[in-house]
Amino acid sequence: MKEPKEYTEIALEKQAKLLDMSSYLENGIYVFDTDFRMAFKTTRPNHPMINTLNMPKKEKQFITEIKHSETKYFNGSILWFCINGDIKIFSDDKVLTICSDKESYQRKIENYAYFSPFFRIPTLSKQDTKHNMLVEEFINFDEKTADDEPFIFKRMYNNYRDYFTYLTRLTKIGYQTLNQLWEISSHTVYSPQFEKITKKIAPELFSMKFPFINLHGDMWSDNILLSHEQNGKTLWYIDWETADNYVFFYDFFKFIWNELDVHQDASFYKKYIAGEFDNELRHLFSIFDINFQPKLKQSYFCYFFLNAIINDTGRIAFKFKQEEIENFERKVFPLMT
Ligand SMILES: Nc1ncnc2c1ncn2[C@@H]1O[C@H](COP(=O)(O)OP(=O)(O)O)[C@@H](O)[C@H]1O
Ligand SMILES: [Mg+2]
């Protein structure tokens, strides 16, 4: 049977990239997942990253052999194509990142240095400036279950509380209003496309000053790893690619939104609206001397989303946000009053 052209093109492109990485991968037969996010050595035993993949039926699998007789610089057996063009290669205990460019490499180093005092990030064990490559420790993570939720939330809450407290004590925080953000954003020319979301935000929030601080920007369950170490459960934060200045409550709502949007899990949003996180939020807001107002819960959530839309550091063009805007209206509006 003839496959559509597009499939073949993608397959060949990914295969070429895989072969390019031969000196970092063990020899053997590699297979791709359905979406070409990853290739892994077929003899690789069960692994948490592989277990969650969509795999084509055996006879439809796209297979490539790595046969390479020269020096190997890394003993990887899983290759992951990151969304931003970086490549990650996994061995049993290390992760090699080959950055797509110098900027991505530098950002990783900077984020690691900046955030690791507050958030546990896999240790960077090697930095190769010449080749824009990094090695970090591989976290032998476990699948998260509903039982882990209280631990994860408590740990995240403590980490953010400590980070916020540090910022208020030892740094100068930049305050901004939504109106100011609106003024400087180049994305507001598309405002009719997200007018309905803008309208859901209480007018008084537009002129209220909020801290805009360096945050993760893509905080959700896929970017936190849970491992069981000798001294108990440990939480690791990964994927700091989108770290940037956002409104101080951004990461919290990004988490709720991604669970809803990507994992189709509205439970966090519903818990938030039901007031289950009110105490924690009140505390986090109070660190910046801001009064958390439960009656503005929907507004805060839409504020976060508007911040995501009009953030225009140039890394994500507006056209990539359109689909997310539609999803937001389709998935969150029915849950709103
Ligand atoms: N240090 C690590 N230890 C274990 N697994 C990791 C590590 N870093 C990344 N991963 C795995 O690789 C996946 C992709 O990495 P990530 O940095 O989140 O890339 P992407 O930008 O494609 O989401 C993660 O969801 C996680 O499963
Ligand atoms: Mg990720």
Image (cartoon, rainbow, N blue to C red):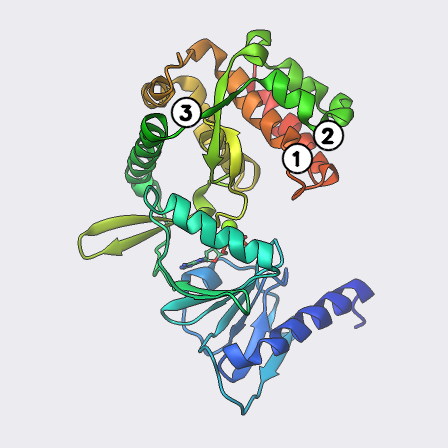
Residue 186: which numbered mark, if any? 2
Q: Secondary structure at mark 2?
A: helix
From this view, report whether residue 36 is shown above or below residue 143: below
Residue in view at x 56 percent, y 88 percent: 68
Q: Is residue 306 left or right of residue 117?
A: right
Return the disc, 2 or 1, that comes first in the chain's sequence: 2
Image position, residue 203 (x, y; %) = 60, 8
Q: Are marks 2 and 1 in contact (CB under 8 Å)?
A: yes
Return the disc, 3 or 2, that comes first in the chain's sequence: 2
Report the mark closest to the observer, 3 or 1. Answer: 1
Nearer the observer, 297 or 122: 122
Q: Secondary structure at mark 3?
A: helix
Kind of residue indicated by mark 3: Lys
Image position, residue 222 (x, y; %) = 46, 48
Q: Label 3, on which residue?
A: 271
Q: How many C-alpha atoms fall within 10 Å of the one at disc 1: few (<14), some, or many (≥20)?
A: some
Instruction: Give the quarter of the figure containing the C terminus.
Output: top right
Residue 312: which numbered mark, if any? 1
Nearer the observer, 108 or 217: 108
Q: Is mark 3 within 8 Å of ligand 2?
A: no
Kind of residue indicated by mark 2: Ser
Measured in 3D between alpha carbons, the distance from the residue under mark 3 to the one under mark 1, in whole angstroms, is: 30 Å
Measured in 3D between alpha carbons, the distance from the residue under mark 3 to the one under mark 2, in whole angstroms, is: 34 Å
Residue in view at x 58 percent, y 76 percent: 21
Residue 121: which numbered mark, if any? none
Q: Quadrant of residue 316?
A: top right
